[in-house]
Image: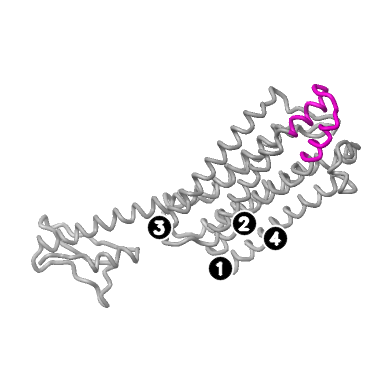
Amino acid sequence: MAVVSDAGGLTPSSLEIQTVIWLVIAIALLFTCFRFVIRLYALRKLLADDVAVAAALVLLLSLAIMYHYAIPPMFAVVQVAEGEKAFTASFQDQAAVYLRLQFAIIVLFWTTIWVVKTSFLIFYRTVFAGLPEHMLGWRLVAGFTALTYLLCWAFQLASCVPVPDYFILGACETPRDIHYSNACLYVAAMGDIVSDLMIMALGLRLLKKLQISRKEKAALGAIFSVGLIKIVFAVVRVVRIGVSATHVNPIWLALWSMIEASVAVVVACLPSFKVLFAHGRRRSEIRQAVTLKKFHARSNTGNAVQPLEGGDMSSATTQSRSGHTGNFYWHDVELDEELRLSDVPN
């Protein structure tokens, strides 16, 4: 690595990089904990997509730890490449450590991003169960997502031939090596963005056929589109790093890779918050329904709420003192059950 391109602007210091890394890790950890608490509160259990998110968080923490140890030798490599420090024997050892860590970091970054995609695919796999038409689309998207991950590996291995030269400072400086190294960045970014868009399309396609109100469609559409947040950061990462005729600046690469990977984990947690709001609204509806039932039982002797044929209370007509009538339609099993079990004084 004789020359390192700069993305422009002031290069952040080692302390600034470390601060940002652990800050975004803390945010991702907080959102993941919220996701698990919400799932346990609303569903009383964790699902397969939760396991995928937990795996992504573990990978993200591993990525941060690797960067913690890679940042000091990384700055030394950049300083020597820019002529700010002299080339010494001890520097060679630092460079060897950095190059090994950097290879692992790149692979770990991709794996974190693609495991987050897997969590969304697992979720949609559950939603599409019993829908052959949608399952076909799911298989195509899952296959494309897996293919893009393998392409990242292929371009990374091709960026320095033979592969062992990757771990030797200055051994991968030919125009061909630099071309493949920079192409790897673009291929990974394009595969990342396109697969995110395809995963989003799975949910939006289903949304068209749902017989629900516009307000509910808008809410679900927002949930299915949270991947746009991740896409924005993926684009910013590629643009900010900057690719020229030399290798990318590893300092900016470290900063934006950690930010994007952390945002990916946060985005995977965002849809869970809808469950909390829906659960809270459902409990409010239950309380209102039970209150109405008790009120009509007290005020309308002989006109109490009567269950329909078969004991179903999904629709019941009641009359109040003012003489108004109204039909109550309960679409929630939990709501039905609580109405049946509520204690109505005679």
Q: Which badge, 1 or 2, comes first in the chain's sequence?
A: 2
SS class of the residue under badge 2? helix
Residue 64 % position (x, y) = 63, 42
What label sits on residue 42 in the rendered view? 3
* Three-letter amino acid code at the position of disc 4: Gly
Residue 186 visible, this angle: no
- Residue 200 is tagged as none
Q: Which residue is mark 1?
A: 131
**Residue at label 2?**
118
Amino acid at circle 2: Thr
Of labels 3 and 1, the one closer to you: 3
Amino acid type at mark 3: Ala
x, y percent for residue 30 = 49, 44
Label 3, label 1: how far apart the Cα atoms are:
25 Å
Q: Nearer the viewer, residue 295 or 186?
A: 186
User: Would you identify the image quadrant in which residue 68 lies?
Assistant: top right
With 32 as the anchor, is 137 left or right in this view? right
Q: Nearer the viewer, mark 4 or mark 3?
A: 3
Answer above or below: position of 189 versus 289: above
Task: Find out whether the residues at labels 1 and 2 contact each other: C-beta distance under 8 Å.
Answer: no
* Nearer-N-terminus badge (4/3): 3
> What is the distance, in whole Å, between disc 3 and disc 2 at their CAs?
22 Å
**Along the polypeptide, which appears first: circle 3 or circle 1?**
3
Decide whether residue 243 is among the magenta residues.
Answer: no
> Magenta region: which residues?
73-98
**Image quarter hosting the C terminus:** bottom left
SS of the residue under disc 4: helix
Q: Main secondary structure of the magenta part?
A: helix
Q: Please name the residue that numbered disc 4 is placed on.
A: 143
Amino acid type indicated by mark 1? Leu
